[in-house]
Amino acid sequence: MSHLNTFPLSFKVKGRRIVIVGGGDEALNKVRLLAKTTGSIEIYSRRIEADFSAIAATIHERALRAGDLAGAALVFVAAEGEDAELAKAEARRLNIPLNVVDVPAECDFYTPSIVDRAPLTVAISTEGDAPVLARLVRAQIEALLSPGIGKIASLAGGLRHKVESLIHDGPARRRYYEDLVTRPVMGVAEAEQLLAAHIANGRGRGLVWLIGAGPGAADLLTLRAQRLLQQADVIVHDQLVPAAVVEMGRRDAERICVGKARGHHSFSQAQINALIVRLAGAGKKVARLKSGDPMVFGRAGEEIAALRKTGIAYEIVPGVSAALAAAADTATPLTLRKISSGLVMATAHGADDGELAHWAALAQSGLTLALYMGKAISAEVASRLVAHGAAPDLPIGIVVNAGRADSSSYAGSLAGLAAGAVDFADGPAIILVGRAIAHGDWASAAIVAASNIKVA
Ligand code: SAH
């Protein structure tokens, strides 16, 4: 194992002087970083060249004098010349930690890359070896930490004495803090309620996150969805959510598939409602993971009603719906000036005479249609639209496994689709219908023609 040549620590600067020698861009960069602190920033330079106006700092536009460094907590030298040499000598004489910008050999310390969620900070350092790598790691950590996490840290800090006086058992205290920091950001009153619940039952109330998982590619998950998956005790997911996404949860989280997999017991909607209510009722944080967006053909309405009825807290996290992924895969604008002034997301189910109003409205809307759950009945869907007045030459495009690496597409007209000769790949599909479809890039799509050719 190699050893560290530097030791990361959090240095107290509140109310203390931080001296920067230099008036150019390098000085400004340091000052920007230091302006995040409650230290009192002083800049010394014979000439101020950069624009420091947006920063709360005292600027001395003059030569540095020997006494200027007295009592400073840190000294940064971002200049060359006489003043710089004096600053270095004085800092060393007074034992003030010194940073000389871009001269590692003369530095007592380096400034790490910082993820700032005050009071929570993450510092990333490569001891100066690879600043670019440090920046990359920083961006990754930025994405992982919710913007509100600093507020939670302050909240926990503010409650510390109270928690210590009320919960004496160490592990129980830890359970409270864990519960507190993995919930959506709350105020003091709610945090105290949670504390009361922990004292009474050893746990807080559960809650349910209805999370959109997107069309099935792990990197089409939102950052929020990813974060909440990491915080959930139980992940209740549909069959359509691929394993790679379900795997993004905490390793020790319980996982329950409620989808209709062949050979598996599948849950009725009522059973799913009862399941999430029971889990949250037992104090669990439940991630209810659904494909695409939870509010689009996701039966979210029923689950929300069940949660409301039982008074269980819930939050909804949107996801990329399949129609949007299909449009992206094929560079198809769903709305297009003068061609299509809107998008209808509709079910293709019930392609029977009982749904006449549904089909008439779709056929005559003049808008782009994105039809869900229609693959197995695509020929009937097309015939039904034509029967209700849609033009037989209206362009259609179908994307199977939209948003995923193995997506495949099919393009043609309503008449071609009605002929029913398409041999689709396995997987869920979105049927897009409308004039705007012709403006997409369907060059690699299989052709759906009326002449009954079998498309491989
Ligand atoms: N809430 C989901 C829809 C669930 S209903 C969403 O917003 O996308 C299930 C239907 O969604 C499937 O029958 C299919 O029509 C569509 N679907 C889901 N994932 C898909 C994908 N990756 N590619 C194409 N269609 C998909």
Image (spheres, grey):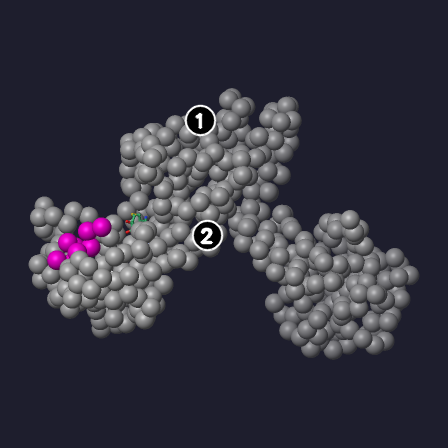
Q: In this view of the protein, which residue sits in the foreground, 292 or 193?
A: 292
Dot 2 amino acid type:
Ala
Circle 2 Cα neighbour tier, 10 Å, few/some/many (<14 / 14–19 / ≥20)? many
Between discs 2 and 1, the one toward the N terminus: 2
32 w.r.t. 237: above or below: below
Q: In this view of the protein, which residue sits in the foreground, 79 or 142?
A: 142
**Residue shown at 15% from the left, 60% from the top:** 419
Position of 24 with respect to 294 (left or right) is right
388 w.r.t. 156: above or below: below
Tell whether position 92 is magenta: no
Label 2, on which residue? 218
Circle 1 Cα neighbour tier, 10 Å, few/some/many (<14 / 14–19 / ≥20)? some
Position of 113 with respect to 3 (left or right) is left
Q: What stretch is highlighted in magenta?
A: 376-383
Q: Can residue 364 be seen in this view?
A: no
Number of the label disc, if any, that sits on residue 328: none
Dot 1 amino acid type:
Ala
Label 1, on which residue? 282
Determine which quarter of the picture holds residue 385: bottom left
